[in-house]
């Protein structure tokens, strides 16, 4: 009997990069539909604009580097980066915001490091942090969900707001909630109320929390959770990173909530509000910028979960996934140095 020898890693199957990226996008598509259903057409417009800009930037850089264009833009990695950035920014943010962010993600964070597989940081999250620091007003101007808004702009109205020259004043009309106050995200509302001396119970009585995780945000997170579980079922991602993120975040929140429930948020609200599920399954699991070993991935995810909790609870930003992911990316070389995967066929040294 003849045997065929091959070098490690020994995998039963190996999907091409474009196939993996395409399937990840398909798994996230239902969540995009849910997000648009609750927050309007703006999210879809932002995603479409980001994807167009990402492909153009990738093609331009390949031309400047005198490399073939089609093999690079057809791997769908730029589309996934654009998708994640598009769903992360406010739906009615001005067009130039997503333009700047996408260009920075593709050109500076991805291609200047050598392209896919060479970048040190998650491109979408690096771009998000850039936009949040440089344009805090536009990046925190979220619209009220459809169930709470006095008026929800349609497709043409959304296009006008995004591409008009007076976006902030126009969008202000559509950020009014049922009680006539400007709309903030649930996590931002909680953080502001706690700083003002209110208890968690008092803050949760506001109309935005009638679904306890925030109007719309609960269902968006459930949709991304379903997409993430589907990716696990299809073996597109490993379970260690998502488990580490959610487990660490839940544990930290549970301990704090058990000791001081009046000044700390419940662990379930942490899990199902903000960008928790999209961050745990679609962002943190980026194989290029994550740890390589199974134990390393678990630790990598746990670092993100702990940082998310600390920044949400004690930092200046209500939702902390972008900062947590980038800080964990910095730790990856150290994690891989001390936690190395064992080569197939070799005993542990």
Image (cartoon, grey):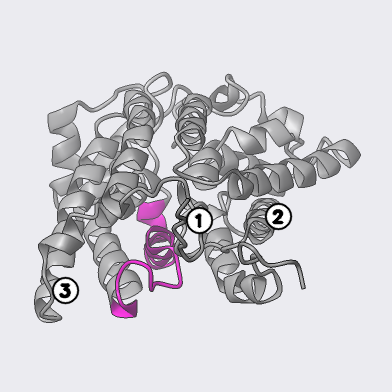
Circles 1 and 2, Cβ within 8 Å, touching? The answer is no
Q: What residue appears at the point 75 percent right and 67 percent down from the top-left corner?
A: 348
Q: How crowded is the residue under tag 2: few (<14 C-alpha within 10 Å), some, or many (20+)?
A: many
Disc on res. 306: 2
Q: What residue appears at the point 56 percent right and 44 percent down from the top-left corner?
A: 188
How far separated are the C-alphas under marks 2 and 3?
A: 37 Å
Locate the C terminus and report the quarter of the image it occupies.
Answer: bottom right
The residue under label 1 is 10
Q: What residue appears at the point 68 percent right and 67 percent down from the top-left corner?
A: 346
The residue under label 3 is 61
Q: What residue appears at the point 57 percent right and 35 percent down from the top-left corner?
A: 273
Relative horizontal placement of residue 235, taking residue 174 as reference (left or right) = right
Q: How crowded is the residue under tag 3: few (<14 C-alpha within 10 Å), some, or many (20+)?
A: some
Q: Residue furthest front?
A: 1
Q: Which residues are magenta?
A: 112-139
- Can you say whether 287 is above or below 30 in the image? below
Residue 82 in sight: no
Q: Residue 246's spot in the image, x, y percent?
A: 66, 42
Residue 113 in magenta? yes
Residue 260 in magenta? no
The mark that comes first in sequence, 1 or 2, is 1
């Amino acid at each position: 009997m003849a045997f065929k020898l091959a070098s490690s890693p020994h995998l039963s199957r190996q999907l091409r990069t474009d196939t993996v990226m395409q399937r990840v996008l398909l798994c996230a598509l239902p969540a995009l539909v849910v997000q648009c259903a609750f927050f309007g057409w703006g999210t879809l417009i932002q995603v479409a604009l980001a994807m167009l800009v990402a492909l153009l930037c990738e093609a331009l850089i390949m031309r400047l580097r005198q490399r073939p264009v089609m093999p690079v833009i057809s791997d769908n990695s730029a589309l996934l980066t654009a998708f994640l950035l598009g769903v992360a920014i406010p739906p009615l943010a001005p067009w130039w915001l997503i333009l700047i962010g996408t260009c920075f993600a593709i050109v500076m964070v991805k291609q200047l490091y050598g392209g896919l597989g060479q970048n040190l940081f998650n491109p979408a999250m690096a771009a998000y942090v850039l936009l949040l620091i440089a344009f805090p007003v536009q990046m925190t101007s979220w619209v009220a969900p459809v169930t709470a808004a006095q008026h929800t702009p349609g497709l043409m109205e959304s296009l006008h707001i995004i591409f008009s020259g007076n976006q902030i004043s126009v969008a202000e009309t559509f950020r009014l909630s049922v009680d006539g106050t400007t709309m903030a995200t649930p996590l931002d509302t909680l953080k502001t109320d706690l700083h003002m001396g209110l208890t968690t119970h008092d803050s949760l009585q506001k109309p935005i929390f009638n679904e306890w995780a925030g109007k719309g945000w609960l269902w968006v997170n459930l949709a991304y959770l379903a997409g993430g579980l589907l990716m696990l079922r299809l073996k597109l991602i490993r379970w260690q990173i998502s488990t580490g993120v959610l487990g660490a975040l839940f544990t930290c929140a549970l301990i704090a909530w058990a000791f001081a429930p009046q000044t700390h948020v419940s662990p379930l609200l942490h899990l199902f509000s903000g960008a928790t599920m999209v961050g745990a399954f679609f962002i943190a699991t980026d194989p290029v910028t994550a740890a390589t070993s199974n134990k390393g991935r678990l630790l990598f995810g746990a670092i993100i979960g702990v940082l998310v909790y600390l920044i949400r609870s004690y930092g200046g930003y209500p939702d902390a996934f972008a900062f947590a992911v980038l800080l964990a990316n910095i730790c990856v070389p150290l994690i891989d140095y001390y936690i190395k995967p064992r080569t197939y066929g070799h005993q542990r040294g």
